[in-house]
Image: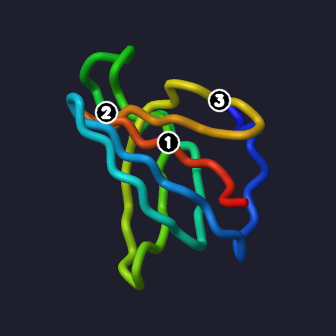
Amino acid sequence: MSIKMPLKFVGSYKVITRRGGAEKQEFCQKLTMAPLARGEQGAGDKENSPTHQITYFCFGCRRVLEGRIKENLEDKVVFQVDEREYEFRPSV
């Protein structure tokens, strides 16, 4: 599945992390989202296994996640990573 939101390597994005009832907002740069090869998706539950690798920089630290697309729109992308939900949207 391709990502509908336009990604620019030099762009700035808002990251909203949700877990339980808590929500945290940060900004990130150098956002990339790459689909995982079928062999890398894991042999577990196909419905909950990760489909994409998400890489971004936040406060100078590189972060790498593997998650499943929950919502794929032109203005935001939401990934489910274990018990957390990561929402990426362009910062305006």
The quarter of the picture where residue 63 lies is bottom left
Residue located 55% across and 48% down the image = 88
Question: In the rendered image of this protein, does residue 82 appear above or below residue 32?
Answer: above
Q: Which of these two is toward me, 24 or 35?
A: 24
Q: Which residue is mark 2?
A: 42
Q: Which mark is residue 72?
A: 3
* Sequence order check, earlier mark of 1 and 2: 2
Local packing at callout 1 (Cα closer than 10 Å; few below 14, some 14-19, many 20+) is: many
Image colouring: rainbow
- Which type of secondary structure does the marked residue at label 2 adopt? loop
In the image, taking residue 8 as reference, residue 79 lies left or right, namely left
Q: Which residue is mark 1?
A: 87
Residue located 58% across and 51% down the image = 34
Amino acid marked by disc 1: Glu
* Percent position of residue 45, x then y: 28, 17
Amino acid marked by disc 3: Asn
Mark 1 vs mark 3: give the one in front.
1
Q: Residue furthest bottom?
A: 60
* Percent position of residue 67, x then y: 40, 39
* Percent position of residue 10, x then y: 72, 76
Question: In the rendered image of this protein, does residue 85 appear above or below residue 45?
Answer: below
- Which type of secondary structure does the marked residue at label 1 adopt? strand
* Sequence order check, earlier mark of 3 and 2: 2
The quarter of the picture where residue 23 lies is top left
Query: Distance of mark 3 from mark 2, alpha carbons?
Result: 22 Å
- Which type of secondary structure does the marked residue at label 3 adopt? strand
Residue located 38% across and 61% down the image = 64
* Percent position of residue 60, x then y: 41, 85
